[in-house]
Image: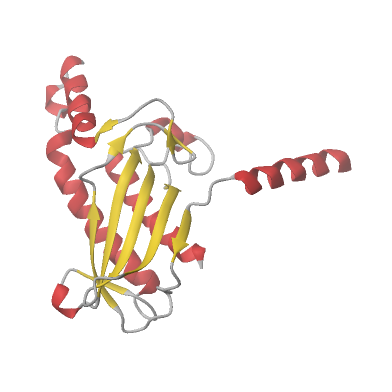
Amino acid sequence: MKKTLMTLFAVMTAISMFAIKPITMEGSFNVKKCKGAVAVYSINWDGTQCGEIDDGVFVKGSMPIAEWLKAQDDQKIADGKPEDANFVKDWEGIKAEGNRYFKEEWNDEFGKKGLRLTLNESEAQYRFDVVIDKLDWGNIGGVFAWGNAGGAIIVGHADLTDINSGERIARFNINHVQGSGHFTDRFRILLVLHQLVDDIEDFY
């Protein structure tokens, strides 16, 4: 029994040593300890590529998000469910909801003692721009599995820029952030944005 436990410990240690870090940072700005600092923010999905991601890398190719969304609708029509073919139309609403949710989660986590996010540029000293380069939408099957299996995955970066000087003072590299699983694509997007806030907090 003791040997089995030691072997299991060794395997888990090896996995943790080589697992990709969800977030890494360039710069020394501490978003948790900058009370009074305010940043106007955005989340940019325009250049997002979609596909299956493992350790931050596409494993079976990718396609632009607009093509991916259309392919989902086309498949529903081909399956005889044209009434469900509304993914392209719904995406704008999902993005807008994700933006609001991200700000709420961020300000709950950091807003009292650290950086607060706003949509009002006139009150901000900084810009906080989140760019999603890669997206794995996850899948329904993962809901019945362990941990975050089936959750959406994002890869990209988030830049904090001083508005007055135009200088980038910090970059969070989003290497592989995975949210919790859920039955719907909409909730998986919200949950991965929640996880992004958690992973940035855990970085410190």
Instruction: Point out the residue furthest to the bottom here.
Output: 36
Residue 193, above or below 151: below
Q: Residue at x 48, y 52 (%)?
A: 22
- Can residue 97 be seen here? The reply is yes
In the image: residue 98, left or right of residue 106? left
Q: How is the protein colored in the picture?
A: secondary structure
Q: Nearer the viewer, residue 138 or 14?
A: 14
Q: Nearer the viewer, residue 144 or 31?
A: 31
Residue 194, above or below 63: below
Q: Residue at x 25, y 53 (%)?
A: 98
Q: Residue at x 21, y 54 (%)?
A: 97
Instruction: Point out the residue furthest to the right here.
Output: 2
Q: Position of residue 134 (x, y in %)?
A: 34, 41
Q: Quadrant of residue 19?
A: top right
Q: Nearer the viewer, residue 75 or 204?
A: 204
Q: Position of residue 41 (x, y in %)?
A: 24, 65
Q: Position of residue 52 (x, y in %)?
A: 39, 31
Q: Residue at x 70, y 47 (%)?
A: 13
Residue 43, above or below 183: below
Q: Quadrant of residue 194?
A: bottom left
